[in-house]
Image (cartoon, grey):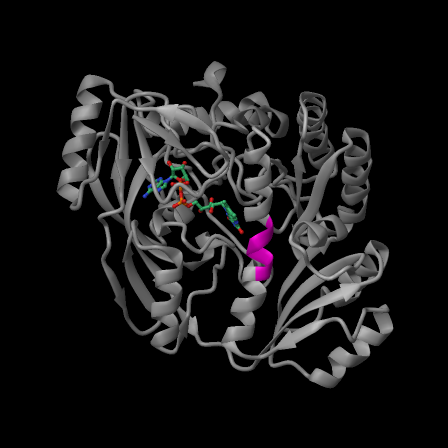
Amino acid sequence: MNFEDASGYAGEAERLEKPSTPDEVSAILAEASRTGTPVTVLGAGTGVTGGAVPTGGVVLSLERFRRLDIGQGEARAGAGVLLHELQSAARKAGQFYAPDPTHNAAALGGTIANNASGSRSFRYGSTRRHLKSLLVAFADGTVRELPRGEAIDFAVTPVHRPTTTKHQAGYQLAEGMEWVDLICGSEGTLAVVLEATFNLLPAPGDRLSGVVFFPTEAQAMDAIDAWRTIPELCMLEYVDAASLKLIDGPKAGAALLIEQEHPDEDEWLTRLEQTGALEEESWFGTAESDRERFRKFRHALPEKVNDTVRKRGYMKMGTDYAVPIARHREMLANYRQGLTEIGGDGVVYGHVGDAHLHVNMMPANDGEKDRAWAWMHTWAAQAVELGGTVGAEHGLGKRKAHLLKLMYSEAEIAAMRAVKQHLDPRWLLGRGNLFPPDLS
Ligand SMILES: Cc1cc2nc3c(=O)[nH]c(=O)nc-3n(C[C@H](O)[C@H](O)[C@H](O)COP(=O)(O)OP(=O)(O)OC[C@H]3O[C@@H](n4cnc5c(N)ncnc54)[C@H](O)[C@@H]3O)c2cc1C
């Protein structure tokens, strides 16, 4: 059977299993453990690093784990529930599930495995922060509820953490860490997530959303620095001129997507004037329909990039690096230098509030593809040099597993391998994810 994720990365498995109860998952894992069969966990397949793409063995889909109970301040949901289903059920109950990865048809299990984050992570953080407990199955078939607060019961050697506001590359080992924090972000390599309890927040009050256009990238960068500390700003996203052109947006040098809770509209008028924004052309709204319109505008971009790359016969080639906020202009200068040297079509957009921009190349020939691939590595090294991370939200999966060595020392990787060995002694879960072949 053939499988492919949203990046176009493909692989094969001997069979696909779709269990609907923890006992069924447990039996599949126990059998795989006995026979030494690799198990790749599949959510909705929207990942872009090949994490859910098998290299043989069994694919375990969680799509039948569909429980969704909304309580006061929390929701219990199966791993196969889609993100937008939780978001809308919470909204109907007058509550709010804060994480908002752009692809809202991702399965909740996948968002937990990747510790996914989105535009509102600028204020609300990534998925990990919103987890109350996890129901998981380990490689040997043991099923266990892991409440927040419960520390792991074995020793780990801590690894360093970059001084970025977002980070999702490797196990974030720390002394006395909790199970929830270990499993969340482990990319299907340590346990299968079956269900989770999520924190729900009270519905936010008034919100102003906007897409603000600027004549130049430089003016947008100045606005970012000026606006980053606005109270209750929950979104600060960037879209460059090439991105606007790709999605047939207005002709402008750059755009910023913003969202603020309890806004003062007069203050925004002053901010637009002070930063030289294109006031007349900019869009603002306060209704849910406006927020959805702006989300679709932003979501169209990665979709269009992925379509274009596939039509041209290549796989997605996009960065997911973040740097400390104070270094974001240096990193942008690196990106611009690389894009000029690569030539052809490339776009820069994303979570600029967290100094986490996605650069996506759309090569039209093998020369551009080879130069883009070389620059992907150079930019990763530059991000690390600036104190950043090689993975801020997409994880490393298989396509970016080689970057683990760029970021961590041999001793740190040995510490991660020891955890993998402890929980999955035959290295069956998510084989090939995080650890490239020479490390697994
Ligand atoms: C257009 C587009 C926009 C995107 N925007 C964002 C964004 O804004 N933010 C962001 O963080 N990501 C984004 N992504 C990436 C992707 O949507 C996320 O990584 C998402 O969390 C993947 O969820 P999924 O259910 O599709 O997982 P899959 O692709 O099916 O799997 C991803 C990984 O999770 C593991 N996994 C899946 N389910 C489980 C489970 N139940 N237990 C254990 N492991 C499991 C898989 O083995 C794999 O390693 C985007 C992708 C696309 C195509």
Judging depth in this view, the residue of 407 and 345 nearest the camera is 345
Residue 355 place in picture, x, y as percent: 69, 50
Does residue 177 show up? no
Prevailing secondary structure class for the magenta stretch in the rendered image:
helix
Front in this rendered view, residue 365 or 299:
365
- The answer to if 132 sits in the magenta stretch is no
The reply, left or right, for residue 288 in relation to residue 370 is left
Q: Which residues are magenta?
A: 297-301
In the picture, measured across the screen, residue 335 lies left or right of residue 296, that is right
Residue 202 quadrant: bottom left
Residue 413 located left or right of residue 198: right
- Residue at left offset 70%, top offset 37%: 383
Q: Nearer the viewer, residue 330 or 164?
A: 330
Residue at 36% of width from left, 30% of height from top?
3
Is 282 above or below relative to 174? below
Question: Measured from the top left, where is residue 327 in percent x and y?
Answer: 77, 46
Residue 308 visible here: yes
| Image position of 436 with respect to 161: above or below | above
